[in-house]
């Protein structure tokens, strides 16, 4: 059977560069980190609810260090992987983990089925994967603004994202014995399109497409800014949404 490589939607070097810039920005005051903070808090709540105390855990993508610190306090042996150097589409160097947590990472790999398969292989028997990603319902106002910016021939400027059903199917395809995918929405108010874009860059969530479109011209950018504020409320703030999908799978 002929093996077909997955389409190259994302550029790994651009992704690594965006994360490096985000960490530099995080050193400044008042930078945004609410997406990752929400993911970390949610994972900690899930672990407490499940009363899960892993002996050996792998944490991917938590540049705040909060999750590893909490797990280490529970006497777990914790390995942290930096997504700037980790290639999720390749087998992991180590295995035998009771718990693997991946945050804000798997939604930007070209071969997600392979990445999930490698993570399952790195789990010990009965080990559990918890992966949080931004889902298909994210950033509807920004998407609408980008369409308004270039109404005749809109360029591809935003990432394709997966939905709940697709995520469940991918977990099953990767061979997880049980799988659960749930979603929740986070709403953030913005006074301008520029502030939203800045927040995304703060968190390493900016564009990393393999074939990025050129920058918007002045007229197109003005249209985007106007469209973004068209739904602003009385306080002149536009409500933007982030859908967070949490994929949970157990290794048989």
Image: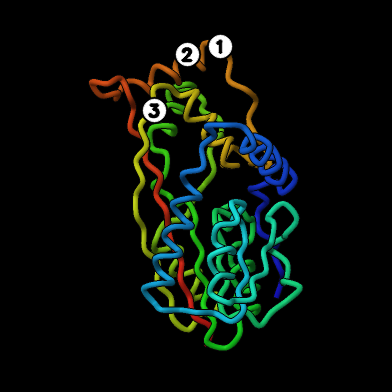
Q: Which mark is residue 222?
A: 2
The residue singled out by tag 3 in the image is 190
Q: At x 66% / y 83%, what residue is drawn?
A: 96
CB contact under 8 Å: marks 2 and 1: yes
Secondary structure found at label 3:
strand
Q: At x 58% / y 37%, what residue is drawn?
A: 206
Name the one closer to the observer, 96 or 154: 96
Q: Position of 237 compared to 143: left or right? A: left
CB contact under 8 Å: marks 1 and 3: no
Whole-percent x, y for residue 9 in the image: 63, 48
Q: Is residue 145 above or below residue 103?
A: above
CB contact under 8 Å: marks 2 and 3: no
The residue singled out by tag 1 in the image is 218
Name the one closer to the observer, 175 or 20: 20
Of discs 1 and 3, which sits in the foreground? 3
Q: Residue furthest top?
A: 219
Whole-percent x, y for residue 61 in the image: 61, 56
């Amino acid at each position: 059977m002929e093996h077909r490589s997955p389409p190259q939607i994302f550029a790994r070097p651009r992704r690594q560069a965006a994360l490096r810039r985000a960490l530099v920005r995080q050193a400044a005051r008042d930078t945004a980190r609410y997406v990752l903070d929400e993911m970390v808090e949610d994972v900690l709540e899930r672990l407490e609810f499940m009363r899960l105390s892993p002996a050996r855990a792998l944490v991917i993508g938590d540049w705040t260090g909060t999750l590893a610190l909490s797990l280490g306090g529970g006497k777990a042996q914790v390995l942290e992987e930096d997504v700037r150097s980790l290639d999720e589409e390749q087998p992991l160097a180590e295995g035998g983990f009771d718990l693997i947590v991946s945050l804000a990472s798997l939604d930007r790999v070209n071969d997600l089925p392979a990445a999930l398969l490698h993570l399952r292989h790195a789990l010990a028997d009965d080990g559990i994967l918890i992966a949080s990603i931004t889902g298909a319902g994210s950033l509807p106002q920004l998407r609408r603004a980008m369409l308004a910016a270039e109404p005749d021939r809109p360029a591809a400027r935003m990432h394709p994202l997966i939905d709940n059903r697709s995520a469940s199917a991918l977990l099953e395809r990767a061979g997880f014995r049980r799988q659960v995918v749930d979603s929740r929405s986070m709403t953030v108010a913005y006074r301008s399109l520029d502030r939203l874009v800045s927040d995304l860059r703060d968190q390493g969530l900016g564009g990393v497409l393999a074939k990025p479109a050129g920058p918007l011209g002045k007229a197109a950018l003005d249209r985007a800014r106007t469209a973004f504020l068209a739904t602003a409320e009385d306080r002149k703030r536009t409500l933007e949404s982030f859908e967070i999908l949490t994929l949970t799978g157990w290794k048989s």
